[in-house]
Amino acid sequence: MTSSGFSNIGDRCTSAAEQRLGGDEEDHCIICMDSFQEKITLKCSHSFCSSCIDSFFKIKPACPVCNSFHGTYEGTQPRDGIMTVRRNRQCLPGYEEGNGHITIDYHFPAGVQGPEHPNPGEKYCSTSRTAFLPACEEGEKVLRLLQTAFHRRLIFTIGTSATTGLNNSITWNDIHHKTNFGGGPQFFGYPDPGYLSRVQEELRLKGVTEES
């Protein structure tokens, strides 16, 4: 699946009868702000011009109104990265009653940007990142979601590094990780009681859920 968004038109459209019985009652498309041309109604009941929603789905296969996904969203993370998982008996701060912690290692070799990146043909440097999750039921769930997000090329992207200011760098892509063992939220570490819930919401906004 590519970032164009959906498998086939049947996955995203309701039948003509369903469109008459329900759905969006507005008489214009919110993308072009004009009267509908070849009206399409998604399964979430929001309607758009066929050409407008097709163009929008090339960027992100999600409804512009409610953000429900109608396909699999694939990002621009470099393709040759590696995600590995290790386990340790030491518990994270705030999870002292748990079963230790999970260490996630990401590694990307240096490469050349592709057509989906900001500067195609220019080089980017290698990078390695390490993150931590508690080895509890919710932590294991987040690990599974992160593995799905990595497979869909959603965890990293190429842009300007927030820490070094360098362009053409591999950067985080709005799915926050705990890169320190301790120190609390201000140091990207634990304890942080709300972190596992927040990161699941960030993943949901990119279409990564257990249901998906």
Image (spheres, rainbow, N blue to C red):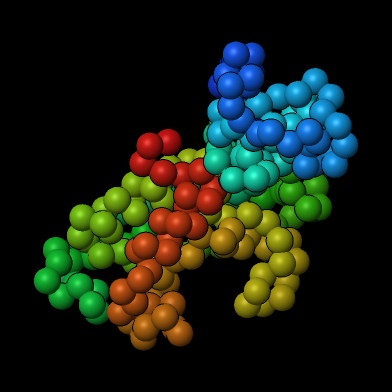
Q: Residue 58, can we see it?
A: no
The quarter of the picture where residue 104 lies is bottom left
Residue at position x 85%, y 40% from top?
32
x, y percentage for residue 44?
Answer: 56, 34
Residue 11 left/right relative to 189:
right
Q: Residue 158, can we see it?
A: yes
Residue at position x 67%, y 44% from top?
64
Residue at position x 43%, y 61% from top?
199
Residue placed farthest to the right in the image? Answer: 34
Residue 103 left/right relative to 13:
left
The N terminus lies in which quarter of the figure?
A: top right
Which of 155/170 is in front? 155
Which of 133/6 is in front? 6
Which of 43/125 is in front? 43
The C terminus lies in which quarter of the figure?
A: top left
Residue at position x 41%, y 56% from top?
200
The quarter of the picture where residue 156 lies is bottom right
Residue 6 left/right relative to 116:
left
Vertical side of 194 occupied by 205: above or below: above
Which of 125/89 is in front? 89
x, y percentage for residue 198?
Answer: 42, 64
Number of on-image labels: 0
x, y percentage for residue 84?
Answer: 37, 52
